[in-house]
Amino acid sequence: MDQQTILVIGATGTVGAPVARQLRDDGYQVRLLVRDPKRAAAQLGSGFEYIQGSVEDHQVVKQALSGCIGAHLSLQAGSNPKDIEQVEHLGVMRVVELAAKQHLTCLTYVSGMFVGAEVGSAALDDQAKRSVEQALQQSGMSFTIFRPTYFMDNLPKHLQGKRAMVLGKQPHPCTWWRPPTLVAWSRGHSRSRRPRTKPSMSRGRKRSPWRKRCISIVPYSRPRQR
């Protein structure tokens, strides 16, 4: 059986790197779209196919998606409004558009924990992510949207000696995630919920071995059990 290819965009990030490694270890051919292949190879090692470029380049994205059965996106452009617009909004929208045209069987996307809530004009990254979620819902593809609260891999950044930094009051316990958990969810190993969309969205699509034909949205908080 031929090895199936999955594209990972954002593979050099804290969340994307473990996902790329997990997919490789699961037996997939993993293709990475990176700005600097030499630097990415030094970080991630062998066993990956590296394509140089970014989501801002239409032709490069099209080339990166060619022959793939699925794609995983985990991008964060920082705080610069121009970068957010070019990368997290227009760039990711470009990936969704081209993935739909190439009939990928599934696309997984790491969104934000507050995207489902009302966002103000200052929350540009949340606005960008909400636009991407809407585009995915209208794409006709099978997809998974993740809205995780916190990844354990980021914990060392918030520790000083024996002290942990906590922002604000926390009425709900934090839901702890490891990036490889995203792979398990997107392959349907965990419980998922049917989307509140038209049933025809996934009807007639070939079932992918990588992902069930439904949408899973990770809740950003989990109420305490009374």
Image (cartoon, grey):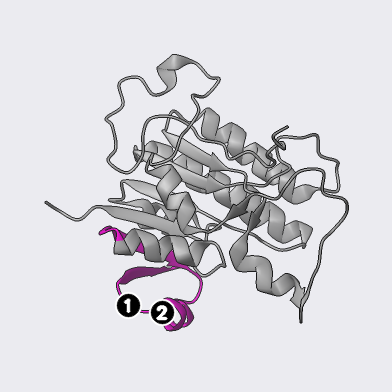
Residue 5 included in the magenta stretch of the image: no
- Using a 10 Å C-alpha cutoff, classify the residue at mark 2 as few (fewer than 14 neighbours), some (14 to 19) or many (20 or more): some
Q: Is residue 210 placed above or below 180 in the rendered structure? A: above
- Percent across and percent down for residue 72 are 45, 52
Occupied quadrant, residue 186: top left
Q: SS class of the residue under badge 2?
A: helix
- Using a 10 Å C-alpha cutoff, classify the residue at mark 1 as few (fewer than 14 neighbours), some (14 to 19) or many (20 or more): few
- Percent across and percent down for residue 133 are 60, 37
Q: Please report the residue visible at 20 percent of the width from the left and 56 percent of the height from the top.
A: 3
Residue 43 included in the magenta stretch of the image: yes
Residue type marked 2: Ala
Residue 41 is labelled as 2
Viewer-side residue, 104 vs 30: 30
Residue 46 is labelled as 1
Q: Is residue 107 placed above or below 40 in the rendered structure? A: above
Q: Please report the residue visible at 51 percent of the width from the left and 35 percent of the height from the top.
A: 216
Contact check, label 1 and label 2, Cβ < 8 Å: yes
Upstream in sequence: badge 1 or badge 2: 2
- Percent across and percent down for residue 39 are 48, 82
Occupied quadrant, residue 120: top right
Rounded to the nearest whole Å, what is the CA distance between mark 1 and mark 2? Answer: 7 Å
Viewer-side residue, 204 vs 174: 174
Residue 185 is labelled as none
Occupied quadrant, residue 201: top left
Residue type marked 1: Ser
Viewer-side residue, 141 vs 60: 141
Q: SS class of the residue under badge 1?
A: loop
Q: How many marks?
A: 2
Q: Please report the residue visible at 46 percent of the width from the left and 65 percent of the height from the top.
A: 18
- Percent across and percent down for residue 68 are 31, 50
Q: Is residue 177 placed above or below 136 in the rendered structure? A: below
